[in-house]
Amino acid sequence: MPEIVKKTILNRDVCRFEIMAPRIAEKRKAGQFVIIRLHEHGERIPLTIADADPERGTITLIVQGVGKTTRELNNMKAGDKIADVVGPLGRPTHIENFGHSVVVGGGLGTAVMYPIARALKDAGNRVTFILGARTRSLLILEDELKGFCDEVKICTDDGSYGKKGFVTDLLKEMIEEGEKIDFVIGAGPIPMMKALAETTRPHGIKTVASLNPIMVDGTGMCGACRVLVGEETKFACVDGPEFDAHQVDFDLLWKRNRAYIKQEKIALERYLKMQQGATF
Amino acid sequence: MGERKKLSTKERLKIPRQPMPEQDPHERIKNFREVPLGYTPELAMKEAQRCLQCPDPPCVKGCPVEIDIPGFIKKIEEGDFLGAVRVIKKTNLLPAITGRVCPQDEQCEAECVLGKKFKPVAIGNLERFVADYERENNLIEIPPRESPKGKKVAVIGAGPAGLTVAADLIQKGYEVTIFEALHKPGGVLVYGIPEFRLPKSIVQKEIELLEKLGVEIVTDFVVGKTATIDELMEKEGYDAVFIGIGAGLPWFLNIPGENLIGVYSANEYLTRVNLMKAYMFPDYDTPLIESRRIAVIGGGNTAMDAARTALRSGAEKVYLIYRRSRKEMPARTEEIAHAEEEGVEFVFLTNPVEFIGDEEGRLKAVRVIKMQLGEPDESGRRRPIPVPGTEYEIEVDTAIVAIGNSSNPLLLQTTPDIETNKWGNIIVDPATGKTSKKGVFAGGDIVRGEATVILAMGDGRVAARAIDEYLQTGKW
């Protein structure tokens, strides 16, 4: 069973894990993900591989505690073992030197975009990263991104840090200022990705979104991750997770991601109650 | 144990087919325990007396792996149950599984001479009985292993085909590693076929036996992603590879509304329930949506499994919608009967045309059209044709599409030198399982499209023999 080698708390909700998974560390490319299962009773959930160290044999996962499984993971510590980690899954990001690439990360989407920004930079792009979050304490990876991006623009919904506003406001500003943008790629909450697509659509800028549908096996076997792209149904796990943002039906994705909202609440409340029981 | 009784043919013919004791339908739809309870020794011996011991037994020809059927039945009649299972295991390593899931009514039992005037001998029930006898009494022998050959074989996929290849080759003295994409070995036996039809403890036992023999099983390993076949052969020193990855890409109907919440592929529904134990949510973390009225679309074994699983997961009403009539249904007769007894409502000669949802994108009805049967198609079954003006809606909150699978391209994308046909199935020499790539063999559903567990095992056996020969002679 893969061991958690290191855990870092990034903020109240988000932790970074380095997990021993040598084969995945060696093979993974930017844009790919793993499926994990914490224990025998666990569910299978996809998590983006944020980084990897092939020499040490570790992969990095950045996890926001939202539902039961992600909170349970965030309560684990270095030395703990995860029952299953399988990957690298999904198609790697198509990387080339586009010229000026703008990479957009909203909230945890930043963790998804981090390795992609790096790969774009390595391929010779000028990389501008637009980093956004609800509030300052939820911003992640600022220093890491500043380490290699040509520019990092920051915004928060509440104005507690950087510019007040949304990532798309910053992107719109760049476009209106006449900055030449050759390629946009982003990940974040679904309404953000939808807004991103609408921001670039009138200007004909090639835009890619990394989608986060519900998955089970992650190898194309079940079809839980169906997304509509143009007129076509695609399986995000094998055809994606990245698609032309101008073609994606984000409303459908948003609805489908709420399929188990009731059960998710039951599972979380039960977990929190059990945790309280364990503490007192 | 004793001699076979001296009964006349007439006396044997008088014995009726011994019914399989089963859980009561009203009870069993409340649990996931196995439906047939198994023969008692008395029932088995009685049933065995019905076999006429034909000199040129047609049942054997009906069996894809040519089990000596009269041979093992004779042993049962003599009370030598262990002897019986040993006869079976000469050609079939997994009788506890095939006794439960083989389509006997289309294979061995279809050929039984008794079937012409009476009911055929219950070959499947007898096979199952002796396999269970051996397992439950801890009499399973670990077969001997030949001396190590110093060669390594990679088996991709821990389903029926792969398990068979592994079992055969480990005994021949090869080092065998099985690579499985999911977190548990067993393939369709684990994620697909439900507990009430094939208890997972039985599959577990067979897999443990392989491990005792020395087979290494690596789960969470997606060949094509975690490593390619070329890497396994060139970097990791595998001398031969067997591909038994199944047909793992579900078909949908391609009708409007198919992406509504509540429309599942049978693969997803069954995986959630069987592999992930969603029926025990929230004790297990994987959920199912709350379903009260379910439509299953399809007429095969998977459709029956889905329908019966749906009942056990608490649905009030389960429809099974099939575009042809009862006669054309490809499912095992026993599964159809079980589904019916349990209260699944069959809607024949009907096909969905649209899924209808509410504002939240949740399924609320399926719109269907009536069909009639026209001329026979390539499969020999009469082609269903829609009858104009007969559309109506069935109110459901869940639909399970069980109309089959095509081949999953994940692995084959990384092996351009393995030839496939237009459906994406691997092309092999049927006598050996050889693919177009040297050292690589294949069998089961990735070759056949969708077939059966026993055919996959048969392919595994053929390939194992050919792999042995290839590794001994080096000849391709």
Image (spheres, helix red, strand yellow):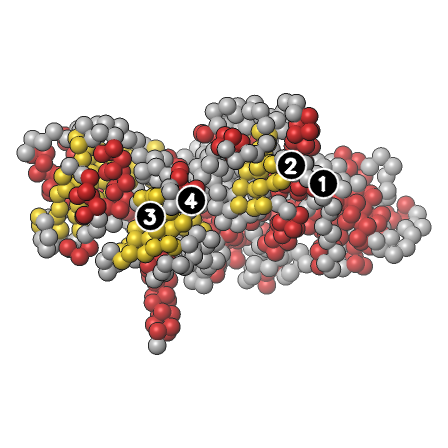
What's under tag 1, amino acid-wise? Answer: Ser
In the rendered structure, the answer to whether residue A46 lies left or right of residue A167 reads right
What's under tag 3, amino acid-wise? Answer: Thr
Q: Which residue is mark 2?
A: B150
Q: Nearer the viewer, mark 3 or mark 2?
A: 2
Q: Residue at x 38, y 46 (%)?
A: A56
Q: Which residue is mark 1?
A: B147
| Residue A175 placement (x, y as % from top left) | 10, 34
Q: Are marks 2 and 1 in contact (CB under 8 Å)?
A: no
What's under tag 2, amino acid-wise? Answer: Gly
- The chain that hosts pointer 3 is A
Q: Residue at x 42, y 54 (%)?
A: A3
What's under tag 4, amino acid-wise? Answer: Pro
Q: Which residue is mark 3?
A: A60
Q: Establish whether labels 1 and 3 are both on one chain.
A: no
In the rendered structure, the answer to whether residue A252 lies left or right of residue B223 reads left
Q: Which label was assigned to residue A22?
A: 4
